Image (spheres, helix red, strand yellow):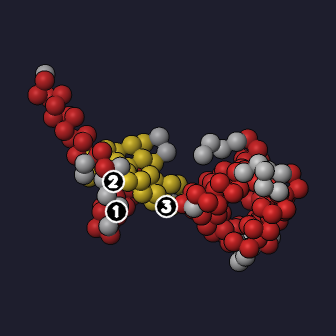
Amino acid sequence: MASTRAAIRYAKAILDLANSKGVAEAVNNDMKSIASAIETNEELSTFIQNPTTKVEVKESALLEVFANVNGVTKGLFHLLFENKRFEILEAIALEYKKLFDENNGVEVATVTTAIPMDAALEAKVLAKIATLSDKKITIENVVDPAIIGGFILRIGDNQYNASVANRLQVLKRELSN
């Protein structure tokens, strides 16, 4: 999902409002839930993107699906209703999370593994992260069987490749020289 300039503007406005009301973290949790729900539920995603569905229907459905969200988040739903922009909700949620993390000195480390991470690998990765960054880090796990084993860690512009596929590439280069 590409983030649009509009999504960034909405996210900044919602974060400012949430900060002024002291509920930025609660809204961040809402945004995580919303982004995850839209990403994992094709029916919800299609419903939000559908241009023929009336905006009134979209707003009331979202208020029902996300009944327990913060008032600021409900305000976002209403704003998207007024501006007929529900299709950028996922982008706004992702953008909000990014801005929230930046404001709180949290950096996202993307860890690519061949299979979902277990506690042992997560501990290994966190130890490596400690040597690369002094910020608070949240881990995002991406599963890619093509790396065969090990992991690839990316924090900002830095990448640490401890994958089996990478070691095989290095070995192949050394043997061909």
The percent position of residue 37, horizontal first and vertical second, equals 59, 64
- Res. 24 in view: yes
The outermost residue toward the left is: 175
Q: Hey, which quadrant is residue 74 in on the image?
A: bottom right
Can residue 13 be seen in the rendering of this structure? Answer: no
Residue 45 falls in image quadrant: bottom right
Snapshot quadrant of residue 62: bottom right
**Mark 3 residue element:** strand
> How far is disc 1 from disc 3 in space, using C-alphas?
14 Å
Above or below residue 171? Residue 33 is below
Q: Nearer the viewer, residue 59 or 153?
A: 59
**From the viewer's perspective, is the residue at label 2 or at label 3 nearer?**
2
Q: Which mark is residue 113?
A: 2
Q: Quadrant of the C terminus?
A: top left
Q: Position of residue 152 (x, y in %)?
A: 34, 48
Q: Amino acid at mark 1?
A: Met
Instruction: Name the front one of labels 1 and 3.
Output: 1
Between 46 and 26, the one lying in front of the other is: 46
Question: For residue 84, which numbered disc appears in the image?
Answer: none
Hey, what amino acid is under mark 2? Thr
Left or right placement of residue 59 versus residue 88 in this view: right
> Which residue shows up at 41% across the image and 53% down it?
142
Q: Which residue in the structure is indicated by mark 3?
A: 138
Q: Residue furthest top?
A: 177
Q: Name the residue rendered at 70%, 42% in the picture.
A: 4
Q: Earlier in the sequence, mark 1 or mark 3?
A: 1
Find disc 1 in the rendering and name its residue: 117
Residue at the far front in the pictured view: 52
